[in-house]
Image (cartoon, rainbow, N blue to C red):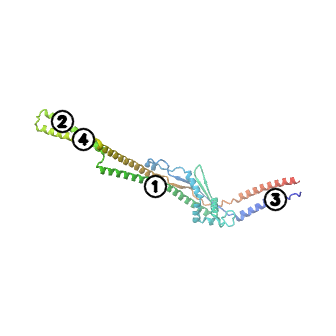
Amino acid sequence: MKPLKLPSPRRLQLLLLALPMLLALLYYSLFAADRYVSESVVTVRQASQSSSQVPGAALLLAGITPPSREDTLYLQKYVHSLDLLRVLDAQLKLREHLAAPRRDPFFRLWGGSTQEDFLQAYRNRVEVQLDDLSGLLTLRVQGFDAAYARALNAAILDHSERFVNAFSQRMAREQMAFAEGELARATTQLQAAQAQLLDYQTRHRVIDPGAQAQAAGVLTTELQASLTRLEAELKDGLSYLNEDAHPVKALRGRIAALRAQLEVERLRGTAPSGEEGRRLNAQAMQFHELQARVQFAQDAYKLALTAVENARIDATRKLKSVIVIDAPSQPEDALYPRRVYSLLTIFLVCLLLYATARMVLATIRDHQD
């Protein structure tokens, strides 16, 4: 069997060491575009989340709470969203900028690229890191121009703040709309209950049967007290006056009138029997039911009014905002590509491949021998 012709060590060095390093040197010297990095640090904050049971205290004690991880994650997703990319492209012509380094085949955006390619290129150049401990969001934006990298970073922060504000305001509006809807419903129910009670009072010519009965009882008690007092005066007068005396006759007349009036009030306060009694009892029950409805509607209205006030306070207190800890920096030197680091990495990889190939070839030669 004819032995397999293996490449010589010199050719192997040329293929696995010299040629890759030459190509890498040519790329990093002539084609690789400088990429500048603008960095900023932000966080999402909102007012205190303390209870709103005491509105005045809530306003006085409202402060700044630690950042919300959920809100920060929302912001992180928004920074890499297609919606923001479209806004940035319209504002800063991002697609044209990414396609500018025509000599760099690896980091430029080629003409006719799809929307998905454009989005992926954007995400590769906009890095968002979240610190779980502090809740800080670090934004690192790459650009082929230092001023453009800073402008892109600032634009992302500006639209991020608008997104957070719009998101929190939308939630506040929904909360207020629900509370105001409940208040409107409670107001309608209260007005309807009051109208029913007023109609009942008008039809039956009664203000409050219970209050009227109580007033009648008070009147009866007063009449009884007056009658007792006059009878005592009459007894005292008869001790030194005759029956035909004018003061005695006057007292007897007043006593008779009080007794007649007292009898009338007693008859009025006595519950009628039969059909009339059942009718009056039904009216009393209906009146008390209408009163209970009005009271329930008033309580519901007060609760709804309190809910609206609390919702208004919460809407003000829970508004979120993006706080810039470190403003977008103006880079002076290109951070990428790291030419020396990249060349050393390529050289080590090629050296590892070369050593592996030498070992494989040496094994093959041993078997051929």
Spatial CA span between label 3 and label 4? 129 Å
User: Disc 1 vs disc 3: which is toward the camera?
Assistant: 1
Which residue, given by chain and number where applicable, does mark 4 sit on?
267
Residue in the picture at 56% in, 51% down: 70
Residue type at mark 3: give it: Leu
Which residue, given by chain and number where applicable, does mark 1 sit on?
177
Left or right of 1, for residue 258:
left
Spatial CA span between label 2 and label 3? 141 Å
Mark 4 vs 2: CB contact within 8 A = no
Of callouts 2 and 3, which one flags the residue occurring earlier in the amino acid sequence?
3
Mark 1 vs 4: CB contact within 8 A = no
Of callouts 2 and 1, which one flags the residue occurring earlier in the amino acid sequence?
1
Of callouts 1 and 4, which one flags the residue occurring earlier in the amino acid sequence?
1
Of callouts 1 and 3, which one flags the residue occurring earlier in the amino acid sequence?
3
Residue type at mark 2: give it: Glu
Q: Secondary structure at mark 2?
A: helix
Residue type at mark 1: give it: Ala
Q: Nearer the viewer, residue 72 or 331?
A: 72
Where residue 229 sits: x, y (%)?
19, 36
Of callouts 4 and 2, which one flags the residue occurring earlier in the amino acid sequence?
2
Where residue 103 sits: x, y (%)?
69, 66
Where residue 263 sits: x, y (%)?
22, 40
Where residue 136 sits: x, y (%)?
58, 52
Observer able to see residue 200: yes
Residue type at mark 4: give it: Leu
Mark 2 vs 1: CB contact within 8 A = no
User: Disc 4 vs disc 2: which is toward the camera?
Assistant: 4
Residue in the picture at 16% in, 34% down: 235
Residue in the picture at 51% in, 58% down: 166
Q: Nearer the viewer, residue 151 or 102?
A: 102
Which residue, given by chain and number where applicable, does mark 3 sit on?
12
